[in-house]
Amino acid sequence: MTPSYDIYQQVFSISMMSNNLIRMKGAKFDLQKQLENHIQLYLTYKDQTPSAGTAATDLIGDWTVTWGPIVYQAEDSDVADNAMLVACSNVTLPDGSTRKMAVVAIAGTAAMSTVDWECEDGAAGDGSAITGVVPWKDFIATPTHAASPPVAGEAVISVGTATGLCTLLGMTDPSLTNAPTLRQHLATLDADILVVTGHSLGGALSAALGLYLVQTGTTPQIATTYVYPTAGASPGNDVFARTFAQALPAVRGAVAWQSWNLDIWNTLDVVPQAWSTVGTDPTIRTLHNVNVIYGNDDHCPPRFLKIPTPGHVKALSARLLGWSLDSTVAYTPIPGASFPGHTVNVIPDHPGSDIGMPVLVPPVDFIGFAAQALYQHGMAYGIAIFADQTRRLPEDQSDPAPNVTREGLKELLGYFETLFKAKGERPSCPNLEPHVEAAE
């Protein structure tokens, strides 16, 4: 039976499954159990068929988890700072052919992860995750997140991107023989196509990880590698973006999200605007769009009858611009495909929720801006990608695993207000080098 979802919707669905923990808190063991329970609802896991049955398989097909899911939790953290899994299936491609596909799905930013925001995204803390860069050729040789001075004409990635990649490359699956790393598992995997996907932080990391796997020759037995990043910020500089485009040429589809090797982005999402500093232009991704993205007026003083950009938003965007410029490299997004965003006046607490938070457009304060940004960065993607589907995957309505709590919209917005209004201090980021294998 052919699944109702096309291959892009299937891949995006698995990407979203890896993000189950983004609003949850708990110890690593408990969060791991929660993610396993969620994954098993939709995918075959440890020989157990999806508990949602045909309600899942009729839509996305029969996918089997072959590695993971693995949760990484930094010291003193109470959230899933990173998570990743691999799933495989025989799929039907747009040309009607059938191939075996392996999908590496990388979770995005855990909403209340200080480690993610400061050490990987680089949007908080002292900015060192963005002002510092790592030469790409050095990372290919031996993965590291130690900053080095940039060299003109050479590809670099941000320290934040490198930190996230080191975390992912250091993960092992203890449930499998010899507890393989991701690279070790992929090197032995029987597949025709490899897709690396992720959303938000996972979007930036999936683009960089896909290029890393190609350039290190990790999967010579797999004929084709694609990436399917959504809502990702720029992983590196202009040379990195060109290197990516040459190694992973864009495959554009009929609509934006039916594409490979392009960052799929919502024109009203602030996250993909990072970290380019070119001038304001709503048709491209640049930090200069942030202050006016929801219709605010960025003039000082604001023009007559115009709603000025909230002060804390202007302060934050100025800080992010400063960090990008301080890096002395030209951060540049990888090639992308955009879909038009639409502002909303009520922000649902979660997909399918009848409970929502009214907001003004344009926003008049930081909370209103953050609420709109949260919607545009999250639910808006699902609405765009599944707009023509009358059926959706059944929502996971089960209670969280024991000792795991789920944070609501108000708690998240309160956390964001505190995090982004604070003046940054040097973050305490984990040292990951001893756990990462060098490229062969």
Image: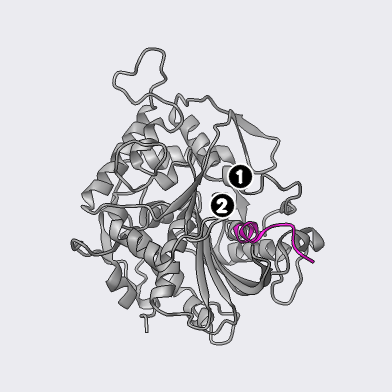
- Residue positioned most to the bottom: 178
Residue appearing at x 37%, y 12% in the figure: 304
Image height of 362 relative to 3, above or below: above
The residue labelled by disc 1 is 384
Residue 361 in view, yes or no: yes
Q: Is residue 7 one of those drawn in magenta? A: yes
Q: Position of residue 37 (x, y in %)?
A: 69, 64
In the rendered structure, find residue 187 and report the number of the disc placed on it: none
The residue labelled by disc 2 is 257
Q: Quadrant of residue 245?
A: bottom left
Image height of 133 relative to 347, above or below: below
Q: Give the magenta part as a residue range.
A: 1-13
Spatial separation of the CA atoms under disc 1 and disc 2: 8 Å
Q: Position of residue 172 (x, y in %)?
A: 51, 77
- Which SS class for mark 2? loop
Asked which colour scheme the image uses, the reply is: one colour
Determine whether, in the image, residue 220 is placed left or right of residue 405.
left
Question: N-terminal of the two: label 1 or label 2?
Answer: 2
Mark 1 vs 2: CB contact within 8 A:
yes
Q: Amino acid at mark 1?
A: Ala
Image height of 309 relative to 353, above or below: above
Residue appearing at x 53%, y 82% in the figure: 179
Q: Quadrant of residue 295?
A: top left
Quadrant of the image containing the C terminus: bottom left
- Residue positioned most to the front: 95
Q: Position of residue 53 (x, y in %)?
A: 80, 63
Q: Is residue 294 one of those drawn in magenta? A: no
Name the one closer to the observer, 416 or 166. Answer: 166
Name the one closer to the observer, 125 or 296. Answer: 296
Name the one closer to the observer, 204 or 397. Answer: 204
